[in-house]
Image: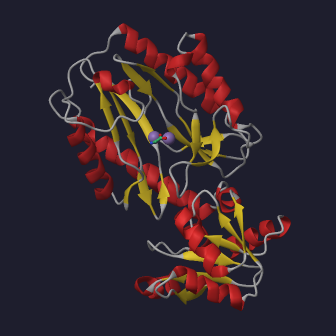
């Protein structure tokens, strides 16, 4: 953790940043190890303060021995003012995509120094995972796989999407996950054309395609996986869509390696799907980084300018969605290795007809 703070300091120095206020919870947890629900960091070249309230002082002291824990008074801004004075700071950079306008206003008035908007500083560090982070993500992926195996027998006509999601989440907890990485998606029949279909009371029926998108959270880290299965039987049109998405997914996966830009990997899947006449039915990016947040850098999309590096963890998840008819998405989690990619999701991608 100390090393992460040092790497941040180096980046701050390169950018001429005197002090950084870290408010985004994932960034704070990444730099501090402190996973309570409230707290901010102030990092300078010589000081690293973790400001939190009475509820968390003991926990923060244990989880972040490399930081100086400061007990927050009734007003966060007043506590920060004390640190600004102590550090003789003239400016304070803040995370512009997270700080609320009201806190900004409050700080502006209380601190009386220049506040400088910054973005992506800690997120840039978080993109490449270390061995401990990879281990947590591996565990999360393995637990989600096990939970999937445990709910397969429930996927029969007559069970509701909501029950499937509930059982899934229960099983993830049962096999050891701390929780879900995000709300489980279960979208069946015509609803499978909704890329992020929230589970409803709809009952699964023979002939449905069912999209299940699920992830576990372990030690603060997420997994992310999607499988689409068929109930009872599958018609030729949907089977063709499945085969198309699977081919695009496999080709894109095979292209994951250091040096490739996110947009280049995206393009491989997108071209295959477009050549089959379904370009308009694949309207989201191919994938995204996964770590403390289920969606983080790098992006695998037409806007993905970042080059892949060993230690990055990304999803590859093309989909084809036919409104009113149904859809297919297949998503794997991949670690970028020295010479390619290692898929963490262990669940078969052959179409399961249950
Ligand atoms: N589970 C959300 C996603 O796949 O991006
Ligand atoms: Mn997903
Ligand atoms: Mn995803």
Quadrant of the image containing the C terminus: top left
Residue 166, position as x, y percentages in the image: 24, 47
Which residue is painted at 61% across and 75% down in the image? 107
Q: Relative to 98, does residue 57 appear above or below in the rendering?
A: below
Q: What residue occupies the far front of the structure in this picture?
A: 109
Instruction: Give the left or right position of residue 54, taking residue 94 as reference.
Output: left
Residue 62, position as x, y percentages in the image: 50, 85
Q: Relative to 69, does residue 132 appear above or below in the rendering?
A: above
Please say whether residue 205 is visible from this viewpoint: yes
Quadrant of the image containing the N terminus: bottom right
Please say whether residue 28 is visible from this viewpoint: no
Q: Residue 7's image quarter?
A: bottom right
Instruction: Give the left or right position of residue 25, taking residue 122 as reference.
Output: left
Asked whether 339 or 63 is in front, the reply is 63
Asked whether 168 or 101 is in front, the reply is 101
Asked whether 60 or 258 is in front, the reply is 60
Which residue is painted at 23% across and 33% down in the image? 155
Which residue is painted at 32% across and 26% down in the image? 191
Q: Relative to 236, does residue 218 appear above or below in the rendering?
A: below
Residue 35, position as x, y percentages in the image: 48, 72
């Amino acid at each position: 953790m100390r090393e992460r703070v040092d790497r941040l300091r180096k980046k701050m120095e390169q950018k001429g940043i005197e002090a950084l206020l870290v408010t985004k919870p994932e960034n704070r947890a990444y730099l501090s190890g402190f996973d309570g629900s409230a707290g901010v960091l102030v990092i300078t070249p010589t000081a690293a303060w973790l400001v939190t309230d009475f509820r968390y002082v003991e926990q923060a002291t244990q989880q972040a021995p490399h930081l100086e824990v400061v007990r927050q008074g009734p007003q966060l801004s007043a506590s920060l003012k004390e640190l600004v004075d102590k550090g003789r700071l003239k400016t304070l950079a803040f995370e512009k995509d997270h700080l609320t306008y009201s806190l900004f206003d409050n700080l502006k008035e209380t601190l009386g120094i220049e506040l400088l908007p910054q973005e992506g500083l800690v997120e840039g560090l978080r993109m490449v995972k270390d061995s401990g982070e990879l281990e947590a993500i591996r565990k999360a992926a393995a637990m989600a796989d096990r939970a999937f195996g445990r709910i397969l027998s429930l996927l029969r006509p007559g069970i509701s999407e909501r029950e499937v999601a509930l059982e899934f989440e229960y099983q993830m907890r049962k096999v050891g996950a701390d929780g879900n990485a995000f709300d489980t998606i279960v979208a069946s029949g015509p609803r499978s054309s909704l890329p992020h279909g929230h589970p409803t009371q709809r009952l699964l029926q023979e002939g449905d395609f069912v999209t299940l998108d699920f992830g576990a959270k372990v030690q603060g880290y997420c997994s992310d996986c999607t499988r689409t299965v068929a109930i009872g039987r599958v018609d030729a049109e949907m089977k063709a869509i499945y085969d198309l998405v699977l081919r695009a997914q496999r080709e894109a996966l095979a292209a994951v390696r250091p040096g490739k830009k996110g947009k280049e990997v995206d393009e491989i899947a997108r071209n295959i799907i477009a050549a089959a006449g379904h370009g308009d039915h694949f309207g989201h990016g191919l994938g995204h980084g996964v770590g403390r947040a289920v969606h983080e850098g790098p992006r695998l999309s037409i806007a993905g300018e970042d080059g892949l590096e060993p230690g990055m963890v990304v999803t590859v998840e093309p989909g084809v969605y036919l409104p009113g008819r149904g859809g297919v998405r297949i998503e794997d989690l991949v670690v970028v290795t020295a010479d390619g990619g290692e898929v963490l999701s262990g669940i078969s991608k052959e179409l399961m007809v249950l």
